[in-house]
Amino acid sequence: MVQIVCSNVEKHSVKMMAELNRMKQEKDHCDFIIQVRNDVYYTHKNVLSAGSDYFRAMLKHDTKESREGKVIFEDVDFECVKNCVDFIYSGKFKIMDEKMNDLLHVAIMLQLEDLKHTISDILEESITVENYFSIRNVSDMYGLDAVLSRCRVFFHDNIMEISNQPEFGNIAKIDILNFVKSESSELSEEETMTILLKWVGKNQNNEQHLQESFEAIKFEKISPAFLEHILESNLIISNDFGLYKLLTGHLVKALKRPDKTKEEIGNDELIILFDDNTDCMRSLNPITEKVGNFHDEKFKHLKPFGTISLDSYIYVLCQNKSVYRLNFHIKNSKWEKLKDMIYDHGQYPRSVSLSGSIFVIGGSDPKSTSDVETFSSYANQWLQLKNKPTAIRYASLVALNDSIYCIGGLQDGVQVSSFSRFTPSSSEWVELEPMRYSVSGSGAVAFDQKILMIGGWRGFYKRDKVECYDVTSAQWTSLSSMHACHQYVSAHYIDDWIFVVTNVEASNVIEKYDISSDKWTVVKPEVDQHFIIYGSTCVKM
């Protein structure tokens, strides 16, 4: 009886493959050459046949390659061929990020199924906004179903960022319609419409599908201000009578919606407070005056910063020109890094929103500047505008009608009472009747053709004074003073109230102004003793 004794089979196999790999590297007993243009690689027929169905078929029969001991490849990358052969010998291969598509092509050509599946797994886990289109295209070309499935999920979860990519216009109509009709999307209807307009803007052939796509939009959830902005600024809509008529009709309906009750306003509009200690955001309900947690995502980037909200986003503008935003309508959203500002506006960049864009004017400590720039949230792009005639820092900014008002501040280290108006559509700066006092670091808010200047610094002293400018009469008047002095103020207009929040102060005192009665009351939010308000903005939920 013959008995077969097994040693460590796995160890023996590994040793044999290592020895064959060494023989390949040293060209020992090699009997087959792989040539790619001027590069050659020495190998063994039996190893190639054992590891690749492609080579097995080639070398099993009396082919030219089998007789000559040589195969010539033309339209492939030599490093990728070498990598695939090394995989046959050792089961290992080099990850070549910049050549992963070429490597997959060679692996499929040589019928290396294990390598194909391994590359597929790597692609599935490495999808980013930047490489989404290249991975999706190669997966579609080679039928990588698992990767395509992952691409569909990634597209759904990251479509806002993907829409900024140049290839976005090549997305198929069916994919866009599936996104618009999806009940699981966490994007607002305004964001969905913005994405559709980007899709058409990057490929005019998609315009024929826009009206069909708009039919799936829930226009009752879109604000009149957004519709007005689209009708005024988007050339795709203004040049298409049918689309213009459609959106105008929805705008008329939106303007006829009943006004919200005060309870609804409290649930709809919130003041967002940044906590300097924990980097968290808290929400202050203007009706109940209660403070609650707002979003799980902390802002852990560079301080100091300025903050502003626009549509569904909170924007943070940092002193190193960097800009971040967070979609507060999406529960698990993360802070997104946007394009840097063109200029350095110092600490706490002063900003204001107007007609769907953000404007930054002048600077703050230690930067005094006349630079003016604007950010288009739809194009993710900063543009230089006409400079302010004089350099300024710690000026107060407020938007009203189609203009931006720049008030007070420091010029050459001296507080000023200057009052100027900038109209972006004409790039025109106009000097107006100055304030009666020179101030800096004040809060500014506009309502009913009036502008309020609140608190700030006069000389070395904090102020409790409130000045009102009537745009119609071009006159300054004084209103009731606040209960306390406030500087570095953020002011927020909500219905018939104005809320004043002092930033970078441990007092956490907020004051509330009743416009109808010209009276101030103190709001003391219930927060823990370590909470310090670093900045604030107002959002619409």
Image (cartoon, rainbow, N blue to C red):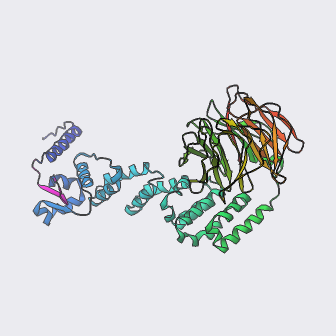
Residue 21 pos. (x, y %): 18, 45
Left or right of 105 in this view: 165? right
- Residue at the outermost top position: 529
Instruction: Answer yes or no: is residue 333 visible.
Output: no
- Residue at the outermost right position: 517
The residue sitting at 52% across, 64% down in the picture is 202
The residue sitting at 63% across, 56% down in the picture is 191
Residue closer to the observer: 204 or 389:
389
Asked whether 53 falls inside the magenta stretch, the response is no
Residue 438 pos. (x, y %): 75, 38
Residue 431 pos. (x, y %): 72, 50
Count of marks placed on residues: 0
Residue closer to the observer: 462 or 122:
462
Residue 243 pos. (x, y %): 66, 71
Instruction: Answer yes or no: is residue 522 visible.
Output: yes
> Could you say which quadrant of the image residue 502 lies in?
top right
Which range is magenta? 28-41
Residue closer to the observer: 421 or 157:
421
Left or right of 33 in this view: 181? right
Q: Is residue 164 above or below residue 298?
A: below
- Residue at the outermost bottom position: 241
Quarter of the figure with the N terminus: top left
